[in-house]
Image (cartoon, grey):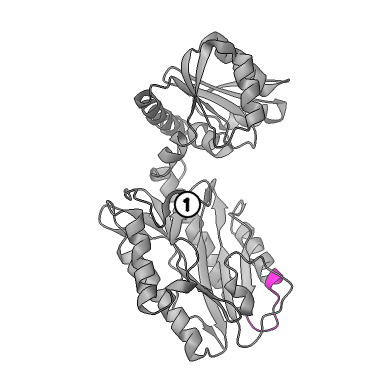
Amino acid sequence: MEKTSGGKQSLFLARRQALAQRLKARQIRGLVVSDPSNLFYLTGFRGSAGLAYLEAKAAILWVDPRYTLQARGQAQGVEVAEVRIGLTQFAGCWLSRNSCGRVGFEDTHLSQKNFSLLREAAGGKLIWVPSGSVARALRAVKDEMEIEAIRRACELTGKVFQSVKSTIRPGVRELDLAAEMEYRMKREGAEGPAFETIVASGPRTALPHARPSSKLLEEGDLVILDLGAILSGYCSDLTRTLFCGRPSARIRRLYKGVRAAQLKAIEGVFAGVKAEEVDGLARRELAARRLDKYFTHSTGHGVGIEIHEEPKIARREAVKLQPGNVITIEPGVYVEGLGGVRIEDTLLVTREGCQLLTPSPKDDWMID
């Protein structure tokens, strides 16, 4: 859904105003933004390098000459300044002249070296406050434009998976399947994969983050496909597990257990529930089937500009889900020497429950 330039400016302005309110609550005057994902979220600029200073009454983006034209075309409602030498030092000197008091910086992104350069150039006028989580916390709740972008990315990903599924058979190489899915994503309009596409087969499916290899699929193999696309700057995430042939009773038990755990967790997703409670639903279902010892990662994560965002759906995560959170639910079991099963969907949290954004079938998992 395209928006007018004025609509985009209003949207980015609203995000910066929300940021300013959070900074004010922490008695921080402004924030130096260095994380490219946060720069995109708060200004619209999608370059890989730049610095911005954002506060209630100021919004300036500094870029080097490689990005000047791009920044002027993409950044919404901010001053764009080209800096030819020493971006970090220039920003520090500007701050020494134009700001004072407590200023935040993204300690989770800005390197110690660059922070030292920034602080030295600014002199002793400022009090520096680590504030790396402020913008990321804002990004956890998606607005209408973001939800629409993620929804379209999920639809594209599901379409690609379904189109490639008919080509999966013994004798096909893992690397070729991964390359084909990434090729078809781009043919469908994706900017690229949201992460390195995972294709693993046979005993290699016991590796949760297996990279595709030159292994050929064989009769009797489990096959895990984990893929996602970037569209309009936003990610999708989908995992399906298939089986080449007729599975044994043990393989069926693994698949049915993971499928039941995922359904149980999805049923427990709604605004106000704690993330750890959703994680617990999946774990308890696997425990009831004596499969919990094979579950080695968290149940899910937020999705947005980056493939892993807040909130985390994991143990000891007491944050409550909010309407507008976009999360994955992806329980898995991994048995050394046998293989693994993982099923993952991307969901939108709503006041009433959740919406499934990746509606690809999960029950037709056997490939004859």
Q: Is residue 274 above or below residue 57?
A: below
Q: Secondary structure at mark 1?
A: loop
Q: Residue furthest top?
A: 97
Decide which of 292, 43 is in the foreground and name it: 292
Name the spot of residue 124 as percent of width and height, x first.
56, 12
Crowdedness near tag 1: few (<14), some (14–19) or many (≥20) residues, C-alpha within 10 Å:
many
Decide which of 65, 138 is in the foreground and name it: 138
Residue type (three-letter) at the residue carrying disc 1: Val
Using the rendered image of the protein, determine whether residue 2 is visible from the camera's viewpoint.
Answer: yes
Q: Is residue 267 above or below residue 138?
A: below
Please give the name of the residue rendered at 41% of the width and 44% of the height, measured from the top-left corner. 140
Residue span colored magenta = 167-176
Image-based side of 176 in relation to 242, left or right:
right
Decide which of 189, 77 is in the foreground and name it: 77
Which quadrant holds residue 212?
bottom right
Which quadrant of the figure contains the C terminus? Answer: bottom right
Image-based side of 251 in relation to 284, left or right:
right
Q: Is residue 174 magenta?
A: yes
Name the spot of residue 119 as percent of width and height, x first.
60, 19
Using the rendered image of the protein, determine whether residue 349 is visible from the camera's viewpoint.
Answer: no
Which quadrant holds residue 89?
top right
Name the spot of residue 289 as percent of width and height, x first.
38, 79
Name the spot of residue 205 as percent of width and height, x first.
59, 74
Judging by the rendered image, the residue that carries numbered circle 1 is 303
Q: Is residue 328 magenta?
A: no
Decide which of 87, 180 is in the foreground and name it: 87
Please give the name of the residue rendered at 59% of the width and 59% of the height, measured from the top-left corner. 188
Please give the name of the residue rendered at 35% of the width and 77% of the height, measured from the top-left corner. 288
Please give the name of the residue rendered at 61% of the width and 26% of the height, measured from the top-left corner. 115
